[in-house]
């Protein structure tokens, strides 16, 4: 694990993008498997997700677009990775196990698993990374959506500082 601290202007931008995402999703219903009693309020969750994405971009020295789109444009843009050209960021909050979605298999994605330090949301702990397809293969079916979501434990992740931007598990370097 490595901790990434945001500079004040990075925190401001992540907070702005998170607020914009929250606003654009006001009318959107939760997925059927979401359990509201286990969830954080949407405003905080959106800002924290943006902090996680920006922290990964900062660590990997890759572009973070801070993209926001309207609910009715989701299908048009949902394929865009969170960071760079192939990084998806999975924020964890109450566990270090990360959700891996079936629909993202075969796309050449890499998952970074991140816990944002609360309550200030100014730092993020990068727990590690794994390729999407390997994560799916190593994960266990989730309790809430076993056909489409698997859960990958932290011990399956590669150390964050071993990421060098290549494709597949050969990203590990010494």
Image: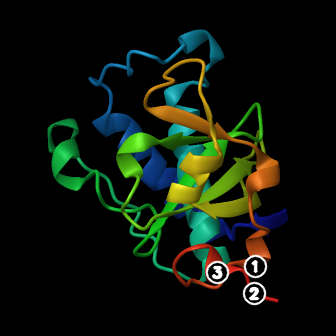
In the rendered image of this protein, does residue 89 appear above or below residue 18?
A: below
Residue 106 visible here: yes
Q: Distance between the residues labelled 2 and 3?
A: 6 Å
Residue 2: image location, x then y, percent: 83, 66
Residue 60: image location, x then y, percent: 62, 79
Please state, as top left, top right, bottom left or bottom right, where the C terminus lies in the image.
bottom right
Relative side of 42 to 162, left or right? left
Dots 2 and 3: beta carbons under 8 Å? yes
Circle number at residue 162: 1
* Residue occupying image coordinates x 44% and y 26%: 147
Dots 1 and 2: beta carbons under 8 Å? yes
Circle number at residue 63: none
In the rendered image of this protein, does residue 52 appear above or below residue 24?
A: below
Q: How would you rate the neighbour count of disc 3 (Cα within 10 Å): few for under 14, some for 14-19, many for 20 or more?
A: some
Label whose residue precedes the other's in the sequence (1 or 3):
1
Residue 38: image location, x then y, percent: 64, 16
Please state, as top left, top right, bottom left or bottom right, where the N terminus lies in the image.
bottom right
Q: Distance between the residues labelled 1 and 2?
A: 6 Å
Q: Which of marks 1 and 3 is in front?
A: 3
Relative side of 4 to 134, left or right? right
* Residue occupying image coordinates x 76% and y 54%: 156
Q: How would you rate the neighbour count of disc 2 (Cα within 10 Å): few for under 14, some for 14-19, many for 20 or more?
A: few
Label 3: state its secondary structure. Answer: helix
Residue with the mark numbered 2: 173
Residue with the mark numbered 3: 171
């Amino acid at each position: 694990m490595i901790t990434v601290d945001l500079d004040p202007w990075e925190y401001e931008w992540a907070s702005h993008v998170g607020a914009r995402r929250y606003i654009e999703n006001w009318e959107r219903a939760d997925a059927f498997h979401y359990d509201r009693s286990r969830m954080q309020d949407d405003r905080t969750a959106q800002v924290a997700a943006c902090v996680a994405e920006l922290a990964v971009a900062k660590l990997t020295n890759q572009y973070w677009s801070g993209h926001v789109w309207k609910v009715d444009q989701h299908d048009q843009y949902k394929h865009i990775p969170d960071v760079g050209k192939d990084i998806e960021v999975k924020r964890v909050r109450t566990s270090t196990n990360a959700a891996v979605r079936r629909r993202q298999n075969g796309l050449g994605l890499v998952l970074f698993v991140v816990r944002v330090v609360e309550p200030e949301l100014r730092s993020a702990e990068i727990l590690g990374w794994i390729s999407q397809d390997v994560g799916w293969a190593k994960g266990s079916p989730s309790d809430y959506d076993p056909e489409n979501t698997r859960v990958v434990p932290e011990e399956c992740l590669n150390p964050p500082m071993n990421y060098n931007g290549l494709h597949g598990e050969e990203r590990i370097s010494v």
